[in-house]
Image: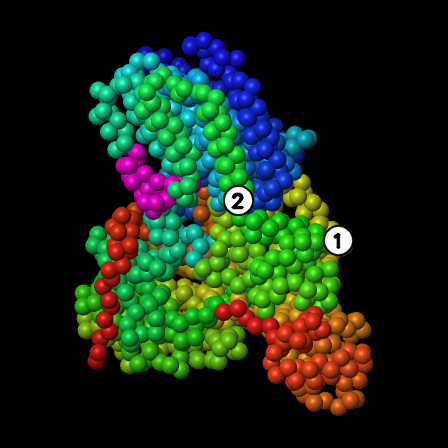
Amino acid sequence: MKNYMMYMLTILLLSAQACNEAVVPTETKQDIPIVFPDYAGVTIPASIAPLNFSVQDEFSRIDAVFEGSETGIIHIQNKEAIEIPEKEWKGLLEKNTGGSLKVTVSLKKEKGWIQYAPFSIYISPYPIDYGLVYRLIAPGYEVYSKMGIYQRTLSDFTQTTLIENTILPASCVNCHSFNQNNPKYMNLHIRGEFGATMLSVNGNTELYTTKTEETLSNCVYPYWHPSGKYIAYSVNKTQQGFHEIKNKRIEVVDLASDLVVYDIEKNQLFSSPLLKNDSVFETFPAFSPDGKSLYFCSADYKTLPLEYDQIKYSLCRIDFNPEAGGFGQVVDTLVSASTTNKSVSFPRPSFDGRYLMYTLSDYGNFSIWHKEADLWLVDLQTGTTRELTEVNSNDVESYHNWSSNSRWFVFSSRRLDGLYTRPFIASIDEQGNVSKPFLLPQKKVSHYDNLLQSFNIPEFVTSPVSFDIRTVEKKALKKERTPFEFRKN
Amino acid sequence: MVGNQDEIRIGGLFELALILILGVSCLLFFLYVIPYHLLYEEQMQLFLFSSDYFLSYFSKPGWLACYIGDFLTQFYYIKGGGAIVISGVLGVVLLMLFLVFSRVGKRDSWLYIVLPVLALWFLHTETNYRLSSTIAFFLALFFFLLYSLIQKQHKAGITGLLLSIFLYSFIGSHFLTFIFLVVIFDLSKRRYSSFPYWLFLVVIGICCPLFCREYYLLTVRQAFLYPMNTLYGFLPSLFLVGLFMIYILSSDNKSFRYQQKESGILLLFTVAFMAGIFLNINQTREKLLSLDIETYSENWEKVSRKAESYQMKNPVATYFTNIAWMKQGILPDKLLSCYQPFSEGMFIPVGPHSNPLEITFSGEIYYQLGDMNMAQHSTMLAMTFSPQSRSARLIKRLAEINLVIGDTAAVNKYLRILDKTLFYTSYASNMRTIMEEGEQNPWLMQKRSLIATYDTLRTAADATASLTMLIESNPSNKAALDYLLCYHLLNKNIPSFMEAFDKWYKEKEYPLPKFYSEALLIGLAQKKVSAKTLESYHIPNELTATFMTYTKRYQEAEGNGVGLQKDYGDTYWFYYHYAQKKK
């Protein structure tokens, strides 16, 4: 019986092989092919899902040979796109970790096979986290539209839904946040009729009302303290506006904003006069990995909406005392808007404490719709700052975050079509060398073409998020919330 | 034509005639009574021939019914296609009902099966009722028929059980119809020992949506209704179950006694039901859809003609009328010849309480004026609120908007999607040709000439900022200028009207429409300008004299407009003094 099965399997494999035509090039090109997604020269983690791709050209068959620098080879031929079997791919990457793959692509056209110059894919020795969590949302902001928070395994193509607002109609779910990528500490805001902030710590899920008499609004942009005892939030009064010219679309401006920190054990918000200043806009808080500093963005007050393009945020830092739960008396400016004449948003320190990445745009804090928005990097050891030209494009680069080992970062970019943000991943080594980023691979090459939603706030997670949607739904529908209190000094 | 006891009765002349009349009536109804409705349904969905698209159906219950339903809905694109598809599907449902009734034992009384079909017809007059729901009903009948063909009770039991579990995934909430039919069928067979089995089926019927809704991310209500969205969707099932129940309770357990007097009652019932269908049509919505579709097709004269014939007192109807008049260049001449609820008929505000139709309609004016950012924003919102958050019409519009603003990467994305459709590939090809021609293409050149060239930041509700920016960018955009002037006139904002007129209209060699002259006279009188200034506006002396007379009579009337209406009812002066907003 066993022999019979083996015999059948061999026939099947041979049949499959027989479907592949022999590639005898009638023409050899000196250029590499224009593949989509652009995986030529990228650096990938050894655990990443297969980099399926196609070529932006007309052809009747496509052929690709992946040859490991150490060992192993995969040969794929298809009609429309290269779709690599997951098992073979994993084996090839594992055998060549730290090395590279040489990819030779041939296209069958009317006159026969055309072979292109091979390109390389580098396999990093650094591991990457388990997955990504992101929100998928249509680029519309006026009414609560269909949206959801999803979890994607990086080693394969599995995407699971954490929550969709179909289960809480007319609600908005946003600002999912984890403590240094640990999914056991999760923050999620629900806006609308069932509005709440969900905090999940080690399996205990509670819904809160975060607006207090002392604060401007509900808590908005979150960032967990590494101890898991605090969460820094911005509180923002916002207004949406629309541009007229073609290269700009939507702007969201803060009419007022402050920073607060939430003490989870004491259920108390607290702040500092240095972070709650009426003449200054403060936003985008982020704790340093040692928990002793709070980075944030700060801009001088301007008259709105008249001077909306004069609002330029600096990158600032203030001491934080995790033991006592208090702030220092001085605000340091790391990147000054008055020097750069630009605006900083989304400061994100790497978890090893070496770097801080931020987005730089011409003005304001809604960099996700600014075509000029690019990623920049501060070396916190040397104090130098530089543009990440290796990953930037002519279109928007905005939200970003680090993997738990700080060797990878994910960022959203609108470079594919100017409209929809897509997640790109790049690596950075100990010397600060940054690789060419790669688009999050999908099973079908047409996935991004067909998708009419943006990837919003891509965050790494170190393990699957355990999200009890029944509990969240039940608690949200009950409308019972624990109110945040504000510490009176 | 009556056969013996064991044959299925095909029907007598009366039955065949009734079915034929119903079929033709159905076809004509969808062809001529609500044709725009079906076109709109097709436009608001997108059917792609791709594996990704197919797999997306598994994210909600009823994937099979929804996929077949949406596949068929795409044929509404063809003129008359919607009527043929719906009539055909209802015909197939009728045939299936006939087979089902035959299995249950009603050979003499099959004509009652028209009742569930009439209910389906009734449901199809609603825009948010999808063909998928009718397909789901059909599949419930089909699977029940398969079940009923199984002779051995234990085999039938296992099949029924398995089908009940899986059917929720295949057909959605109509799996409940299947379960009820199984239980009633067993009842009719006097299989009373199967009571625990029926109970188990009912428990499955309740538990399946409750358990699966976590996977499908639906509320409890949605889980029991999907792909329908109201309880009315179960109307055909209700009729069917009712008929079965009557059969079981009837004295002769083998069949209804189908008698002459019953045929009369059935006929009357059918006629009454059809009358109900006609009466149930939301005439306002159907008229608005007709204006919307013709506006989308840029048939401006047709929109004007239809609007004038409808004489609707509805802000959305006024909105389409104003767009059509603007495009024909007759807005300032015709402004007050239709219902004008101040400026509410100029733009459709979008907010959390807007319905999907309003959101879809709201972008048209911006697109026609040249405010592509607002047009894009409205279109994307409308896409999100379309039934499946994907719409062929809105993708076309997004492609057009991005082509106008020169964002070719985005255009190509949308065109690649349309390449995977059955009916929009030629559209995609045409768009590529326009893209290649660039500004050599007259359509593209004209559209690009309207867009704003410098920037401002404004709120969504600030329509005047949009119009002002368009005129500032392109002072020859007379459509935008007329729209702005009329907007001020309707709001009785004479100072803003005068300011805009002086800035952009006065020095141009445009003809002076009557309403503008009348408004100018009010403004100039308020400013108490000199005769020389008055002269500079080239207002006909005759009109100035009439204004003097009107003013005198207005002062004499002391606020009572009744006496003035006959002579001045069609003037802007009368509107200015007497038009009031409805509270």
Residue ID at (70%, 74%): B568
What chain is tagged by disc 1?
Answer: B
What chain is tagged by disc 2?
Answer: B
Residue ID at (43%, 17%): B107
In magenta, the rendered stretch is: B204-228
**Residue under circle 2?**
B279
Which quadrant holds residue B540? bottom right
- In-front residue for pair B268/B142: B268
Q: Is residue A408 left or right of residue A306?
A: left
* Crowd tier of the residue under label 2, counting other residues whose Cα lies within 10 Å: few below 14, some 14–19, many 20 or above: few
Viewer-nearest of labels 1 and 2?
2
As drawn, the residue found furthest toward the front would be B261
Residue ID at (67%, 76%): B564
**Residue under circle 1?**
B441
Q: Give the percent coordinates (x, y) of residue B479.
A: 70, 65
- In-front residue for pair A283/B425: B425
